[in-house]
Image (cartoon, rainbow, N blue to C red):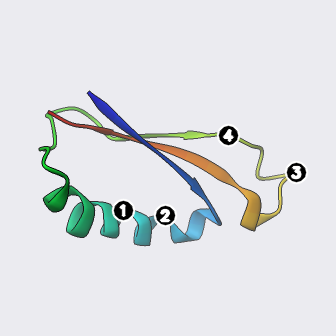
Amino acid sequence: MKFRLLYQSPYTNLGIVYDTIFAQWLPDCGYELRNASVFEKYINDPSRTEEEKLKTEIYIPLQ
């Protein structure tokens, strides 16, 4: 199973998002991280989108 999180904000804040996912959300969610890669899908073009409106899908493999 993959958990999908839609994040909207500058890419520079992604480190904080990952810290929150792995330090707070994952321990409390009732699932474990599966042995697979976490990956991101960038929804819009950063050369044509304001930083605050950048959208990123973050996929977390869970078991």
Spatial CA distance of label 4 from label 3 is 12 Å
Report crowding for label 4: few under 14, some 14 to 19, many 20 or more residues within 10 A (C-alpha): few
- First along the sequence among labels 1 and 3: 1
**Residue assigned mark 2:** 14
Q: The residue under label 1 is which amino acid type?
A: Tyr
Residues at circles 2 and 1 in contact by the CB criterion of under 8 Å: yes
Q: Position of residue 14 (x, y in %)?
A: 49, 64
Please tell me which residue lies in front, 55 or 37. 55
- First along the sequence among labels 2 and 3: 2
Residue depicted at x 75% and y 59%: 53
- First along the sequence among labels 4 and 1: 1
Mark drawn on residue 18 = 1
Name the secondary structure under disc 2: helix
- First along the sequence among labels 4 and 2: 2
Q: The residue under label 3 is which amino acid type?
A: Arg
Mark drawn on residue 48 = 3
Spatial CA distance of label 4 from label 2 is 14 Å
Q: Is residue 14 left or right of residue 25?
A: right
Residues at circles 4 and 1 in contact by the CB criterion of under 8 Å: no
